[in-house]
Amino acid sequence: MQNTEVEVNKPEINAPKKKKRASSLDRIKARSGWFFIAPFVIGFIVIYLPIVFESIHFSFTEVKVLTGGGFNAEWVGFKNYQEALFDNPNFVMTLTLGIRQLIFDIPAIVIFALFMAILLNQKMTGRAVFRAIFFIPVILATGIIDRIDQGNEMLSYLSDTSRSIATGTSDNAATTDTSVTSIVSVFDFEWLFMSMKGVSIDLVIYIVNAVNNIYNIINRSGVQMLIFLGGLQSISPTIYESAFMEGASAWETFWKITFPMISPMIFVNAIYTVIDSFTAKSNTVMRLIEFTYDEPGGQVLSSAMAWMYFIIVILMIAVVGLIVSSFVFYQRREN
Amino acid sequence: MNATDQTSTKVKKESKNKIRVDFERTSLLKRLRIKYLSVFFFQKVIWVLFRLVLLVGVSYVVLLPFFAKITGSVMSPEDFIDNTVKMVPRAPTLGTYTAIIVENDYYKALTSTAILSLLCAVSQMFICTLVGYGFSKFKFKFNSLIFGLVIFTLIVPHQTLQFSMFMKFRYFDFLKIYEIIRKFMGVTVAKDLKINLINSYWPLALLSVTGLAFKNGLYILVMRQFFKGFPDEMEEAAYVDGAGVFKTYFTIILPNAIPMMVTIFLFAFTWQWTDEFYVNLFTTDTGPYLLPRIVKIPRTLVQSTAAIQASTIYQSAIRNTCGLMIIAPLLVVYLIGQNFLIQGIERTGVTG
């Protein structure tokens, strides 16, 4: 801390006093630091920590609300967890599907966000307008709107122009898909990639899923895009200039300069995407948990499910963090 | 490109500030040909077109639901039976809007949600600024450990905690005071001394004041990053001039942090506005009438559509209209404040 030095420089008469005074100023500063974070610390200890512990506790109990006010929690051990894992028909299936979806979504969102950020980073007219449009979902498609958009029959009805008049309303019930109807099919892509050797069918299916899921991906990559934009703008233009002078192509420039410089942001965005998508309302597992919560007596069961899901996601964050941090490049470490 | 021209230059007139050079100008046609008939120009045009198509396409995907909702909101029930009507209504009507405003008490919900959102957003803004400043500029014991707890509150989804959170505020007992009173006074003090905070603004206000509400961990993180980039010299100058820590905070730090605080305010405001998780958790039908409660089918419209085959789509359209009316005020807020929102994130670069 440099400000202690400033204070110290003034009295140069007796040396031992100097040290005492500096340390007391440090102590005062430390104490006022506690004051600044006091609201959070008090709230955490008084409200949040009891809530977390009670939630863990409740997941091991059966709760009965008493008529005279108050409630009674009876310890039942791992019964709720057993019920969730073995008796509930949907939980395990939804969980595996949800985690698979998450694994599919992370690279798609991060790559899409990076791509769009690079596009938006170039000089062109109407840049601010596009940026504002891409950010709309972050602000407006949350909470209650997200809830309304789940199983939105009107949207799929209005935007689906392919349906012939003859079939009529009979297939309305079938289109419960939330987003726009599928844009491309696997067969289109297979046909496109047929002549190319070495493109596996898994990759084709992945791309097809990503393209058909584009609405979802765009909606969820607004913040990531801005984080990437901020990162791109902090890269010094002189690096690009010298690379251009040396005759590097755009492709080489991307992989040798942009990618390493942006890799800390990739780390942040991967973690952010995991957190954001597993706390989102559109997440199927979260929906199942909320659905269970609304059922009679399902509150404790939903707590048990939620804690299991939370542990799995923490593990996933750790795995994603390890994978991504293996290629993160920090500029500071070099100098 | 004009390299050949330089050989033929000659100085025509030279003054103190200007040199006028006479040279043979390349003909316009030649210059145009060099400029526009090259491979580079062609590549550039292709790239610009490609970029434009891509950006417009993505914008279309983002905006399409909103356009569909707007057209759906003015379509009459007859338009939903008619299969040839898709995006353009044939018999436009404003009946849905008036029914929602009159029967679902739109304005009442609007004012109560506005009060709640303002309350939460203002307190979250000040608290997160305070806490973020504390984390960034003071070195005390356990600083990084407590900051880890902030991240913990950000990661744990609130759905995990919803039951115990409900119980906490249903039988609210600050610091177990009532428990202690009951122990000392005997059984005479009844159990229901615990306060029921459900159906009031208190749960959300308490969460906001302690920086525990929706995404507050993120705001604290953003504020911390912002203050880390804030030069120490300003505070040092204030300390040397004899200002205390708090005087420095209020006179030097806060005025400089206003753009960032506006960003946080806007985020907190909009996310609180569209929130339905906490509203459903902390209020019931008898509680404060907030905006998520207006998402229901007005009675007059139910009767008029009872016989219609396409009524599910029509009901979905009504729900979408409710959603549109909920976010309509936010759209104005966004148009005014979008620069703060976007640049706020860009500027800090949430790099942990």
Image (cartoon, rainbow, N blue to C red):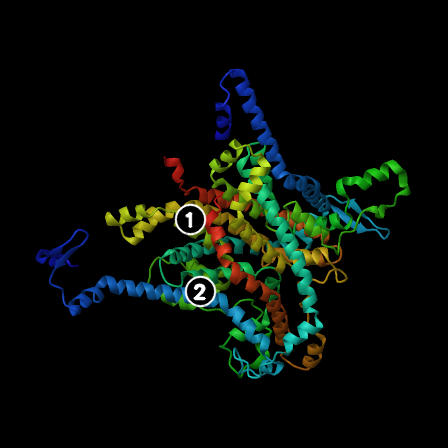
Q: Quadrant of the C terminus of chain A?
A: top left
Q: Nearer the viewer, mark 1 or mark 2?
A: 1
Q: Quadrant of residue A332?
A: top left
- List x then y, in percent, for residue B292: 66, 63
Extreme-front residue of the structure: B16
Q: Is residue B146 visible?
A: yes
Q: Is residue A1 visible?
A: no
- List x then y, in percent, for residue A234: 39, 47
Query: What type is the residue that disc 1 sits on?
Result: Gly
Query: What type is the residue that disc 2 sits on?
Result: Val
User: Residue under circle 1?
Assistant: A231
Q: Around disc 1, counting alpha carbons within 10 Å, would you say few (fewer than 14), some (14 to 19), or many (20 or more)?
A: many
- List x then y, in percent, for residue A263: 41, 46
User: Residue under circle 2?
Assistant: B58
Q: Nearer the viewer, residue A81 or A31?
A: A31
- Chain ID of residue with mark 2: B
Q: Is residue B107 above or below residue B5?
A: below
Q: Nearer the viewer, residue A311 or B53?
A: B53
Q: Around disc 2, counting alpha carbons within 10 Å, would you say few (fewer than 14), some (14 to 19), or many (20 or more)?
A: some
